[in-house]
Amino acid sequence: MKFFKQPFYGWWIVASGGLVQWYTSAIFWRGFQAFVPPILSTFGWSHGATATAVSLQRSESGMISPFVGVLLDRYGPRKVMAFGVFVTGSGFVLMSQMQTLWHFYVTIALLTLGMSFGTYIVFVVTVANWFIEKRARALAILMTFSAVAGLTLPLLVTSIEHFGWREMLMASGIGFWIIGFPATLVMKRRPEDYGLLPDGISDEGSQSQESQNDRLQRVREHAITMRQAVKLRFFWQLAIVTSLGQLVSSTNLFHFAALLEYGLTTALAATAAGSVAIGDISGRAGMAFLGDKFDKRKLLTIAMLMQTVGVMGLAGINASIWGVNLGLWPLPFFVVFFGLGFGASIPLRLSILGDYFGRRSYGSIVGLTSSVNALFGAAGPAIVGFIYDFSGTYRIGFTTLALAILISIPLTLSLEPAGRVAAKARTLTNRRHQTIN
């Protein structure tokens, strides 16, 4: 008699991938801002020089993502991730020794290359391959690790002040190797390669009254190729929806400055910005409970609506409309809805891609979608920054983004059901075969 049931192996993949995601976010995605001031102080570089490096990083990441997705579909995660872990750690170590601006650009390029191969896409694709019925839950848990990393920023700032930025960059690189290489060994391509079924269904054994055929029926999925996907309106419609979300969320580096411009005190602005991060965590974690229970299209619509309300709230703080000053009442709308909507949208959009297109070419499809998202993500800060330079205020830029993301609501509402999309993919394939014959 078994008193302890061994966890499904897919959850070990979620845990190890989540740990690397947390560390990557803590030292780079959310934490690298702590390195920028002391680096600028050391070398006297302009903010524009470092901002250009960040924009190039996002563009480079967008170009690499489709290639990484194809490699994951073809060779699996281990070799791809091992290369990425080595390059990422090397990038941090080399950055700790930089002396000139071109050193900074080269090491940023190395970090982008390494993280593209060794972090986000690898874990998303691998986790999606191990889960079908519980895919939204697994992806939501994975993504929550990244959001939680924002809470460690004060510790990183203190460590840099105490030990120095060079020493902490060196430690970050070595730490990435220590965490990343063992996690690489946990990554496995698909459960079927090891005699299992997605979601741990094969572990139910004699305790389940279902037949093997019934269990296989539960994990039946669509199998749409990359070539089929790019010919479907649904693919580009969803890509536009998620990219509009990325357009808005990528401007978070301006939130604090905008709140100060609107007349908030430093303490209140910091509290508001920090609360958005908590909303981000809550949105991702919430989808672990709701994502597999309700229609993901409706949940994504709600998430995009919350982001829209959130950015409208940011643009409306202390704004005057028809001679009436709105004061601070729009602030709660920004604090509550912006992070919550963005956080919820991340696991939802990744899970929808898996539900609609299956696992056959999931890596390639996620890679291409990430590439489109990256282009919008690079454009967001540029738009807000350019409008600020022209107008002297952040309000016009965020109002423009609010109008842009509003387009995502009808687009999300009109997303077709998965079965209809799969039928259209089969029709396209049949027509192609008839043309060839």
Image (cartoon, grey):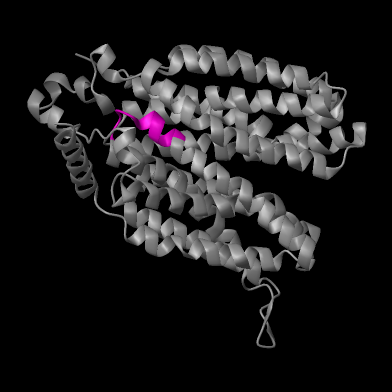
Residue 366 drawn in magenta: yes
Instruction: Name the residue located 42 percent from the left edge and 63 percent from the top edge.
Output: 409
Instruction: Name the residue located 46 percent from the left edge and 58 percent from the top edge.
Output: 304
Camera sees residue 191:
yes
Picture quarter containing residue 147?
Answer: top right
**In which quadrant is the N terminus drawn?**
top left
The x and y percentages for residue 256 are 73, 55
Picture quarter containing residue 423?
Answer: top left
The x and y percentages for residue 188 are 38, 16
Horizontal relation, residue 390 to residue 134: left or right = right
Magenta span of residues: 358-367
The one of 55 and 302 positioned closer to us in this rendering: 55
Tell me if residue 2 comes above or below residue 163 in the rendering. above
Horizontal relation, residue 311 to residue 282: left or right = right
- Magenta: main secondary structure: helix
Instruction: Name the residue located 28 percent from the left edge and 14 percent from the top edge.
Output: 193
Picture quarter containing residue 260?
Answer: bottom right
Residue 216 drawn in magenta: no
Camera sees residue 134:
no
